[in-house]
Image (spheres, rainbow, N blue to C red):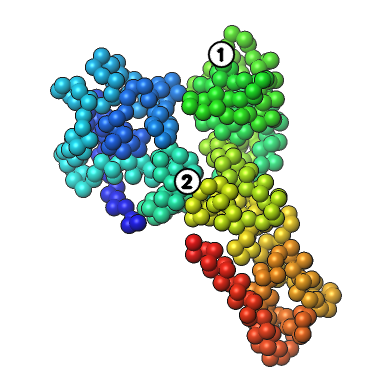
Amino acid sequence: MAGIQFRKPDEKCIAALLEKEGYSSAGLILRLAWLAGLLRGEIAALTWKQISFTQKYAVLPDRTIPLPSDLTVYLRNLYILNRGYSDRVLLSDARKEPMAEQSISRIARNVLNQAGEKDVRLVDLRHDYILRQLAEKSISETARISGMTMAALQQHFTVLMEPQEKQREEKTGFFDAEALKEALQREGLSPAGSILRLAWQGGLSAPEIRTLEWDQLDLFSGGTLMLEKEERKLPRELLEYLRKLREKSPRKESHVVLSARSLKPLRADYVPKLAREALVRAGMDGVTLLDLKKDWIRRTTYETPLLKILATDGHLTSAIVAASLGVPQKQAYPMLRDLVKAKKLVRVGARYYDPEVVPPPEQHEEIILRCLREQGSAVRQDLVRLLNIEPRQAYPILRKLIASGKIRLEGNRYYPVQTGAASGDAGVSQTAETPEGEQGDTQRKEEFSA
């Protein structure tokens, strides 16, 4: 599949164009593509029933898209203007009738040309939206709201990101979970404590936290949280916390999170502000509310199920992940890399292990040499048990140590090489290890060529 042809729109130019076009069909088309990432066909088919002004979502057949506040206000005003004409959101300026897809492309091209963006197409606005999402959200969340697969995003979009955006994408929001747990205990039933818990243990965004009402929660029989088009099972710890919070909250207020003094719903800007202050108090200066939600997404979508498989099978591979989660094998690699970064897994060759069981590769040489110095010699099986890996994974490690002159092989035993030892033994032992070692290398190449 060839790479996409992307022409980046000028942000200031598009913003000025949106201001100029106002509530015209052109203004709406550009907004839905640039601020919500909709395709041409999705813009043409969008109806008012698919939009929630209170929850700030657009519900499409294959995904639910969060709407920015300014776009939500714009759409609410447009609804007031056009609600008597049709259930479709996009209508022609003159006849107030639904528009064909070809007309949408023509209108977008004309206004972009007039604004000086002659090489920018309607689809470029969507692509720019996707790149902005990748700069702020995890790749899995971007896939969910854009309707694209993680593999397609990695193949076609991460290469288009600006260097600083790539760096933000690499910062996956990992943090000290124990420090956060301590912060949650200190914050207790305060608004900040509720915000942090709802983001980290419930996966809610700032707007969802601010608008969350008790009617959306079943705290007893089901233990569930009802969002638009989605019902979530509440984890036990969060469920117990919310029960305590409910007992403390005034019954007349329907919102879950209230200000500490007035006991009224929080303003939109207060949710991230309170979260930020609490995280700073916990010594987690670089962590944001978005990072907490990213961590929830990672844990619920693949970390928790994969670690259960790891506990049963003892190891993971990209093939195991793909088969278990029902995703393409290429999509399994970033998941495994994320878990390695989070220190939930350690990679040895093409396999991934529990870091509590298998030491990281950078420690293998030191462990082997220390064992040989203390015991004088060891057979390969002794070293395999020491590292808790499979025999074929030990071959490249041992060959490397032999080639560097740090150990030697005599018969079936490995010995530490003293200073000044002859290098001839290393050559002999390398040859002896080559056949099975090459087999292991071939398997790894096959694994990563998929």
Rendering coords of residue 140 (x, y %): 49, 44
The N terminus appears in which quarter of the rendering? bottom left
Rendering coords of residue 203 (x, y %): 56, 33
Between residue 147 and residue 327, name the one nearer to us: 327
Rendering coords of residue 77 (x, y %): 31, 19
The residue type indicated by label 1 comes to Ser
Q: Secondary structure at mark 2?
A: helix
Q: Which badge, 2 or 1, is on the more N-terminal residue?
A: 2
Relative vertical location of residue 417 with respect to residue 72 in this rendering, above or below: below
Q: Is residue 407 left or right of residue 106?
A: right
Which residue: 27% across, 31% down? 44
Q: Which residue lies under the disc numbered 1?
A: 254
Q: Secondary structure at mark 1?
A: loop
Q: Is residue 40 left or right of residue 314?
A: left
Q: Label 2 vs label 1: CA separation?
A: 34 Å
Between residue 224 and residue 126, name the one nearer to us: 224
**Looking at the image, can residue 43 be seen?**
yes
Q: Which residue lies under the disc numbered 2?
A: 139
Relative vertical location of residue 377 with respect to residue 144 in this rendering, above or below: below
Residue that extends furthest to the top in the rendered view of this protein:
252
